[in-house]
Image (cartoon, rainbow, N blue to C red):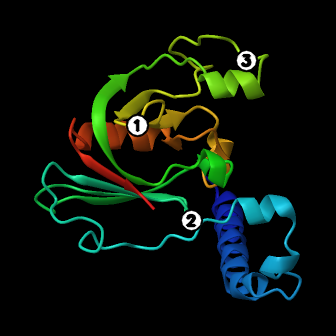
Amino acid sequence: MSDRTDHLLGRRAFLRSGAAIACAAAAPAWAQDSTAFPEDDAPEIVKRNIAGFRAHRWQPHFDTLRGGAILVDTKARSLHYWSEDESVFKIYPTSVPLSPELTRLGRTSVTQKVEGPSWAPTPSMIKRNPEWPPFVPPGPDNPLGTHALYLSWKYYRIHGTHDVRKIGRQSSNGCIGLYNEDIQELFELAKVGTQVLLI
């Protein structure tokens, strides 16, 4: 390479790094921009996507971690998992039911683990949405995503989703949804018998 080419490459690299430094220095000012919406004035789409992650301790919710424990905070739209020996603690963002009428709270447990679940709408879903198909096999159109943890409550699942827009929102018909990569990880951690509490 000639000296001129080296000089141009060096100059370009210098200008790029200078621009990056200037942008990084301006970032705090942009983050504090006075045009940001106060929460009450935020457009509806912004309000529905807000998820406040509160880290919970397991002791107020469970007597023991025997078999592991899953806590679903429907207000914060998050799922907490603790392993029995406390060596693993995970927090995942979730989707939650659309309305209080569809939200079941309380204690249950994992009764079955299914990789590649099929899906059929419940009788109440068919009543609300008669155009829905009666059965969806495993695959990209399946609303349960790649993995599902079946709970002792009939029709209730903790499952994945192929529609990532649902996470962080009130968007389900009763189940708790996670990103497919998160449910895959939780699927490996949880066991049949893992205790579950929805608050």
Of the image marks 3 and 1, the number of the one nearer the N terminus = 3
* Residue 64 in view in this figure: yes
Q: Amino acid at mark 2?
A: Lys
Give the answer, above or below, for where 131 lies relative to 5: above
Where is residue 90? Give x, y as percent. Answer: 33, 58
Q: Which residue is mark 3?
A: 132
Q: Residue at x 15, y 48 (%)?
A: 67
Q: Residues within 10 Å of mark 3 (few under 14, many from 20)?
A: few
Q: Which residue is mark 1?
A: 153
Proximity of marks 1 and 2: CB atoms separated by less than 8 Å: no
- Horizontally, is 113 left or right of 31 in the view? left
Proximity of marks 3 and 1: CB atoms separated by less than 8 Å: no
Where is residue 198? Give x, y as percent. Answer: 43, 56
Give the answer, above or below, for where 21 lies relative to 119: below
Q: Residues within 10 Å of mark 1 (few under 14, many from 20)?
A: few
| Cα–Cα span, label 2 and label 3 | 28 Å
Q: Of tags 3 and 1, which is closer to the observer?
A: 1
Q: Residue at x 59, y 31 (%)?
A: 162
Tell me the tag on residue 75.
2
| Cα–Cα span, label 3 and label 1 | 23 Å
* Residue 37 in view in this figure: no
Where is residue 76? Give x, y as percent. Answer: 54, 66
Q: Amino acid at mark 1?
A: Trp
- Horizontally, is 20 left or right of 188 in the view? right
Snapshot quadrant of residue 117: top left
Of the image marks 1 and 2, the number of the one nearer the N terminus = 2
Quadrant of image for the C terminus: bottom left
- Horizontally, is 137 left or right of 62 in the view? right
Q: Residue at x 78, y 82 (%)?
A: 30
Of the image marks 2 and 3, the number of the one nearer the N terminus = 2
Where is residue 177? Give x, y as percent. Answer: 52, 42
Q: Amino acid at mark 3?
A: Trp
